[in-house]
Image (spheres, grey):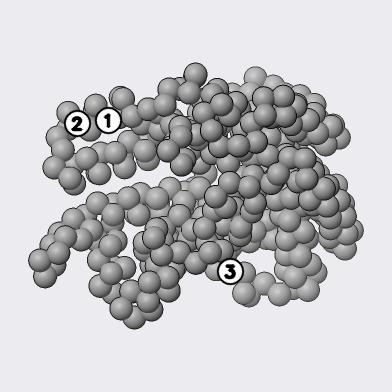
Amino acid sequence: MSSSSRLVALDVLRGITIAGMIMVNNPGSWGHIYAPLRHAEWNGCTPTDLVFPFFVFVMGVAMYISWSKTDFRLTWRASGKLLYRGLALVLIGWAVSCYGIMLRTLSTGGSWADVGDKIVHGMRFLGVFPRLGIVSCLAGFCLLIFKPKRLPWVAAALLIIYCIIIAVTDSFYLNTDNIVARVDVAVLGENYMYHKGGIAFDPEGLLSTIPCIAHCLLGAFAGKLIMTTGDKWKKVNQLFIFGTVILLTGFLLDYAFPINKSLWSASFVLVTCGLASLLLALLIWIIDICGKRRWSVFFESFGANPLFIYVVSTLTAITLSNIRFSFHGEAYSAWSFWYKVCMQPLLGDNGGSLACALSLVALMWIIACPLYKKKIYIKL
């Protein structure tokens, strides 16, 4: 696909989310982070809690655009593509996890046998990439089976089902009785899960994938609003109305089902999809209508190859965190050295930590920019 045929505003929004994900996931020190760059402890939403759901929303928009070329026909070929991409994303996530376990074990004096033992008995099965793989596959099937005009109803049904499950089981709190945690423990086992507050609870859990599918479908519906309208002003107006309605609905639903990223609550879905729609409408107005595009090239570079850049950033961060050496009698990793010796003395605790994160974003842009300029798109 040539750059001229791509939806630039969508690439920019996708690039903003990927740059944001890299920044919030890689501070110089987890003990020194500015408040907006932290996740909410449980209920509530910070700017950091927006980046991943924004990407899921954008994935839904791109899904609509992609499958519109085949008139949304559910064929064996289409089914194969959905299953292949979903499985590929899951396996990429597992491979990255294995790489992290390997480096952490070997860099602390462990053996290859220890690496194998930790992978077999303690690798986290879920996470960002497995969730993207499962959601892209299942949301894709929903799109092709129910067709675009029914997407709001399918999304609403999924959110209502999830709300009923949470309400009936009183799973509003972080404890061992939470149904989201109980499902993961029963299916996966505690050793293979993320632990939050000392409890086996995965924020990318199996049950909370239900509302995440609805999240992606709302993104696909936003894609329908964009692609079925020729007039640019009408695109902006429709996205603005859609975003405002679901945003306000999400805030109202917050009184009964609090906004919660870890649970991926229905109110969280509606609020974040509403905000993403409004931001996309703003970007279409700025870039496509007003023609103000020069500022966006930085984010377009990330948006052209988002998952590839995110994988590279994750592998880079893991590697730098496990290259260990001594300096003036103190033990450092390459990443902690960059923070404690280079950034912290210049910018302070929080400022130095943020500077480290931004330096990784800058490094990834050095990789992303040539790919973008040469129109090389690496699909994952």
Looking at the image, is mark 2 or mark 3 nearer the viewer? Answer: 2
Indicate the amino acid at tag 3. Val
Picture quadrant of residue 124:
top left
Give how far across and how far down residue 130 sits, in percent.
Answer: 50, 34
Of the image marks 2 and 3, the number of the one nearer the N terminus: 2
- Is residue 290 found left or right of 333 in the rendered image? right
Q: Is residue 19 visible?
A: no
Label number found at residue 8: none
Determine if residue 252 is in view: yes
Instruction: Identify which residue is drawn at 18% across, 42% down.
Output: 106
Circles 2 and 3 in contact, beta carbons < 8 Å: no
Which mark identifies residue 118?
Answer: 1
Q: CA distance from mark 1 to mark 2?
A: 6 Å
Q: How many numbered discs? A: 3
Q: Amino acid at mark 1?
A: Lys
Q: CA distance from mark 2 to mark 3?
A: 45 Å
Q: Secondary structure at mark 3?
A: helix
| Mark pair 1, 3: CA separation | 42 Å
Type of the residue with mark 2? Asp
Q: Is residue 119 left or right of residue 52?
A: left
Q: Nearer the viewer, residue 333 or 289?
A: 333
Q: Which residue is mark 3?
A: 297
Disc 1 secondary structure class: helix
Q: Residues within 10 Å of mark 3 (few under 14, many from 20)?
A: some
* Classed neighbour count for the residue bearing mark 1: other residues with Cα under 10 Å, few (<14), some (14–19), many (≥20): some
Q: Position of residue 317 (x, y in %)?
A: 35, 54
Question: Which residue is the site of mark 2?
Answer: 114
Foreground tag (1 vs 3) = 1
Q: Is 347 above or below relative to 72? A: below
**Contact (CB < 8 A) between labels 1 and 2?**
yes
- Which residue sits at x=38%, y=78%? 347
Please identify the quarter of the rendering in which residue 290 is found. Answer: bottom right
